Image: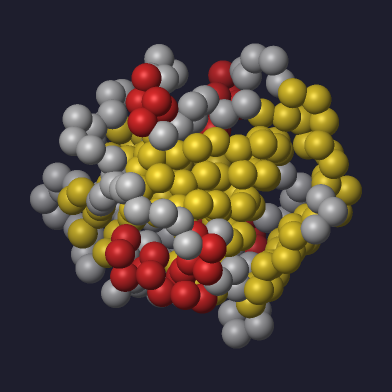
Amino acid sequence: MESLKSYTTHRPWAMPKHPWSYSQKWNDVIFLHYKVNEQLLRTFVPNQLELDQFNGEFWVYIVAFNMEQIHPGLLPSIDSISNFYELNIRTYVNSNGKPGVYFLSIEASKSLACILAQKISKLPYKFAEIKRKNNCFESGNNSTKKFFSVQYSIGHKIQQKNDLEHWLTERYTLFQDYKKEIYGFVVHHKEWELHRLKIQRLIVDYPMYNFFFLKPPDEFHYAKGVAVLSWKKTKENIVKFEMFYHPQRVQHN
């Protein structure tokens, strides 16, 4: 994993100089990207994070993938907590001039992994029943009435990403709010190698966010995966924090 640190030409800014904390793999990745209304999106993101945009358009995206072999430092991975399916809903933000992503929702298929992730990272992981088989990824949560299902086929590799595809996928920081503070998490991996994706069936039913998903995704891709290094969270240098959430949004405590 240390050899990953030599692949840096694709990064928009330098990696941290201090040692990384965790390694992991994000495999069999599905990206579904939606153009969304800026005013609606603004109500779900802390005011101190600037909404990022591409040519004046704002985006939310769903990422479904296999989280594999996540473990701290030189310690080994443990199957019961290191390998699981994960489903995210994210958007694009900037903090202190640094582009990144912000999680609207994070779900994983193992409850113990969710508990540990919440405790260690403070990221808002929630448990969901997730199944994956024969190019079908399905997630459901009866208590929150959330449901996602996609059936797909994988097309040819994209030889060179266009500017939008690069903007949509090459992000190396995530930002999250916790107890009225904003934290940043730095990650590093090789540049994504994207494939075309054909969607055969798609259902997205997330009551709080359904107005983002009233139409088919505007962009969609597949990636075999990347090995990832990540660093512990650091507090963003933001003087004042004001909450501008949709009334239904549950704050992370």
Residue 77, visible in the rendered structure: yes
Height in image: 176 above or below 108?
A: above
- Give the x, y percent position of residue 132: 74, 60
The C terminus lies in which quarter of the figure? bottom left
Q: Residue at x 14, y 54 (%)?
A: 240
- Give the x, y percent position of residue 60: 56, 47
- Give the x, y percent position of residue 163: 56, 19
User: As drawn, which residue projects farthest toward the left?
Assistant: 239
Q: Residue at x 31, y 23 (%)?
A: 13
Quadrant of res 161: top right
Residue sitting nearer the eye, 42 or 14: 14
Height in image: 12 above or below 199?
A: above
Left or right: 112 with respect to 133? Answer: left
The N terminus lies in which quarter of the figure? top left
Q: Residue at x 21, y 64 (%)?
A: 180
Quadrant of res 177: bottom left
- Coloring scheme of the render? secondary structure
Residue 51, visible in the rendered structure: no
